[in-house]
Amino acid sequence: MASPAVRPAPGHPLDTAASYARLGPVLQSYLRRWVPPDDVPDVTQAALLDLWRTRERYDPARSLDAWALMIARRRAIDYLRARPRPVMPLSAVPDPPGQDGREVAGRLADAAEIAVALAALPGAEREAIELAYFGGLTQREIAAHLRVPLGTIKARTARGLRRARQLLTSARRREALA
């Protein structure tokens, strides 16, 4: 159960001892979410000092807790903005996980070589391979789609893959010699 809000009588300044005793624990609990634990007392003190300095702006018709928390939030933001940010040398930053540009370039080069090899295959073999690898169809589905026996699709796929492998191997050998 929350304690009732303490409201000073209109015209009376906030008593600093009473304010600290009443609001200190509330502000510290709130500030633990924002600032490092070692700095909570200092930011709490800054917030209470601000509360005392601006006491004439306090509207007794409103909650003292809410007003104090608003001031504490502002002091926490000021604290966080003012503290130095750690600087890490670029060499200490690990490479980001994921794709390396060289890997992407290598895959693109491989894809171009594969496209050239597929284009060099006879049409029936190329069609069977494209439906299997790019269309995601099984050999049975390809046979039904093309209305040819399953054994024919298996033979076309096997011959096409063998020819594509030979084309890629010879292209890479030529590239290595160049």
Image (cartoon, rainbow, N blue to C red):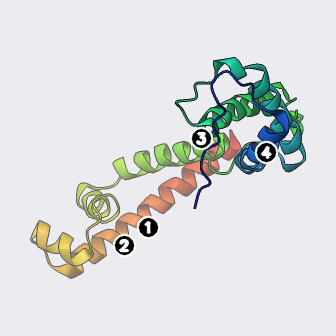
Q: Compute the Cα span from label 2 to label 1.
A: 6 Å
Disc nearer the start of the sequence (1/3): 3
Judge the density around disc 2: few (<14), some (14-19), many (≥20) Cα neighbours within 10 Å. some
Q: Which residue is mark 4?
A: 24
Asked whether 35 or 111 is in front, the reply is: 35
State the SS at label 3. Answer: helix
Q: Compute the Cα span from label 3 to label 4.
A: 60 Å
Q: Compute the Cα span from label 1 to label 3.
A: 25 Å
Q: Which residue is mark 3?
A: 105
Q: Which residue is mark 2?
A: 158
Percent of width and height locating residue 24: 79, 45
Judge the density around disc 4: few (<14), some (14-19), many (≥20) Cα neighbours within 10 Å. some
State the SS at label 1. Answer: helix
Asked if marks 2 and 1 touch (Cβ < 8 Å), the reply is yes
* Amino acid, disc 4: Gly
* Amino acid, disc 3: Ala
